[in-house]
Image (cartoon, rainbow, N blue to C red):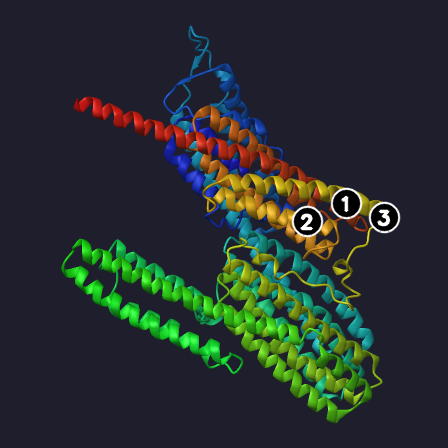
Amino acid sequence: MLILKYLVNLVNMYGTSTISYNLGTMVGNGVEWRGRRAVSTLIASEIVVEEMRPEITTLINHKDNTKKSDKTLQAIQRVGQAVNLAVGRFVKVGEAIANENWDLKEEINIACIEAKQAGETIAALTDITNLNHLESDGQITIFTDKTGVIKAARLLLSSVTKVLLLADRVVIKQIITSRNKVLATMERLEKVNSFQEFVQIFSQFGNEMVEFAHLSGDRQNDLKDEKKKAKMAAARAVLEKCTMMLLTASKTCLRHPNCESAHKNKEGVFDRMKVALDKVIEIVTDCKPNGETDISSVSIFTGIKEFKMNIEALRENLYFQSKENLSVTLEVILERTEDFTDSAYTSHEHRERILELSTQARMELQQLISVWIQAQSKKTKSITEELELSILKISHSLNELKKELHSTATQLAADLLKYHADHVVLKALKLTGVEGNLEALAEYACKLSEQKEQLVETCRLLRHISGTEPMEITCIHAEETFQVTGQQIISAAETLTLHPSSKIAKENLDVFCEAWESQISDMSTLLREISDVFEGRRGEKYGYLSLPKPMKNNGNLKSLKPDKPDSEEQAKIAKLGLKLGLLTSDADCEIEKWEDQENEIVQYGRNMSSMAYSLYLFTRGEGPLKTSQDLIHQLEVFAAEGLKLTSSVQAFSKQLKDDDKLMLLLEINKLIPLCHQLQTVTKTSLQNKVFLKVDKCITKTRSMMALLVQLLSLCYKLLKKLQMENNGWVSVTNKDSMDGKI
């Protein structure tokens, strides 16, 4: 909500840092303000944001000066009016929500009344027509009630927050209601006995799943916690793929009602969908059924990271923790390496090296503890240096262990993916089914089970070395998918073998085989992402791993099929893409100038450039984005990344002088509306006009990239200027001190 960001600027004008800080904290990236997008989700209140005028950026911070020029006073009045108008629209949306939700109507209406009163108060207190105290220098001294502005801002903050949180409850209720409708229809589908009845109910089920997909998708975009976002993406991917499986598995059961393997196959799909639906509700409500807790163990890489943080803390505090805790923590990490050393697929060389490094880490921890005890009793320079050396040694050993584990897991995964790239076993199962050869079915089912166990164990090892929590979730999702889909392929193949002339049984087996192939492809992408993160080549791009892949038999899910524009449209998209590709090169050049590559502005800029490059590849028919839906999903993330960038730049602007700050804020306010416009375009439904939507999206993206290049350049120059001013101030201060001594 830009209302609150504008309030920060307004309150800064009156020199009140406390309320400004509180407001800034509420709208910052660090807080998951769960209700923020709820209102726009319900009644498209992006109007509230879009119509806020960019002129408010002319407001600058004059905390100690009560005299304002006429231009500044006009800016104050504009922002006061803009806030009041935006609050008015916001209140209308809130009232509409209240009318649709009687159980929350009273609470929402009270909060809306408070917000409206606060907006009107702010408009009145910033009205310059009431000020006529002109000074001799042509400036006006403001006698506005500063306390009144602060009170109104606080009331507005409180009331808007109440409305948003109440609207969030409405969204949660909508998702739960939608899930319950899906479950109820699934129960009817499980019991259906005729094709005609099945077709009618499945049509209803499809509509309900679309509604649930939209609601849960919006919620996924709202989540700030990347781990929750990855879990939501995994659950939604299961539902996406299982919808097609449910169709063919149910039809097979109806065609062959006495076939046990067909019923087993269908039950597997229903069970997995129910688990996925429950997982979405767990994430949305932030609670597990029956008070359960997350019992998944910490990965080796995460454990090593935490252990290194603990030993490095000894540099500052020798009494930070006990020696026993450090020993236990290391033993837990090394115990988990047994997943590698005990694996039948780990080579002898890798196993020996892992055991050697584990022993070395234990020895170096004992040496560290010995020096640590000495350092607690006598604090000499030599002991401090010895402690530092011990910390560096064990850190080095653990880094070597990480490299060895990474090499073991990625090499195993790469070899496995290469070996199974041709899907020989799946082809054999299909052929066996059509031939009705039960003996051959048993042989190839056994081979698929072996392949499944290999893939499951490899996913488990990849999870240990994934490096980020979201990618850990993706590894767990892949492991579960192989485990479940492997069994379902075997049951589908058995059904076809028993009924070799059945077209629906063949189609059913094809669907499950395609799901397996799709997961193999996802695993290949996951492997590349893990290696990129380990080697520091890329930022957080794991969010795109859960994109659903198009399936050959998805006749009912037309949006997933690759779009094929005509030659003229292709030429236009290619031209737009070329300009976008050039802008990504410009952005990369600006990023390379920065000395601090870990700077938030640089990181967000790099992520945006990387995503824009993927869009450029899409226009050439290359890269990871295969369908328009893939493109739209990435554009949503791109827009969100742009808003994160603007927040970081705004934080940086607070360190600058008024003129420089104004210049930077003007650039920011060009980017913010573009981000929101892109979000709006991606949500707009344009049936049979996919090209038009893609065209609009890439055009918006190109404009955002052009602004990104300007912002990166300007921020770099202002940062250098700030550093020079700070260094100059230090030099002058030192010189004055020396002069004083003389």
Seen in the picture, residue 157 relative to 425 is either above or below; the reply is above
Residue identified by numbered label 3: 567
Task: Indicate the position of residue 7 as horizontal and vertical percent values.
Answer: 48, 33
Closer to the camera in the image, 481 or 242: 481
Of the numbered discs 2 and 1, the one sitting upstream in the chain is 1
The secondary structure type at the circle numbered 1 is helix
Residue 208 visible? yes
Task: Indicate the position of residue 307 as horizontal and vertical percent values.
Answer: 35, 64
Quadrant location of the N terminus in the rendered image? top right
Of the numbered discs 3 and 1, the one sitting upstream in the chain is 3
Q: Please identify the quarter of the rendering in which residue 490 is found.
A: bottom right
Closer to the camera in the image, 325 or 587: 587
Residue identified by numbered label 1: 573
Label 3 amino acid?
Ser
Count residues near mark 3 (Cα–Cα under 10 Å), then give few for <14, some for 14-19, many for 20+: few
Label 2 amino acid?
Leu
Seen in the picture, residue 578 relative to 526 is either above or below; the reply is above
Report the residue at 55% width, 49% height from top: 167
Decide: marks 3, 1 in contact (CB < 8 A)?
A: no
Closer to the camera in the image, 96 or 365: 365
Quadrant location of the C terminus in the rendered image? top left
Q: Could you tell whether 461 is left or right of 732 in the image?
A: right
Q: Identify the residue at the far left of this view.
A: 378
Label 1 amino acid?
Ile
Q: Could you tell whether 98 is left or right of 431 in the image?
A: left
Residue 84 visible? no
Q: Identify the residue at the far front of this view.
A: 349
Task: Indicate the position of residue 497 as horizontal and vertical percent values.
Answer: 77, 88
Count residues near mark 2 (Cα–Cα under 10 Å), then give few for <14, some for 14-19, many for 20+: many
Count residues near mark 1 (Cα–Cα under 10 Å), then give few for <14, some for 14-19, many for 20+: many
Residue identified by numbered label 2: 615
Disc 2 and disc 1: Cα gap in Å? 11 Å
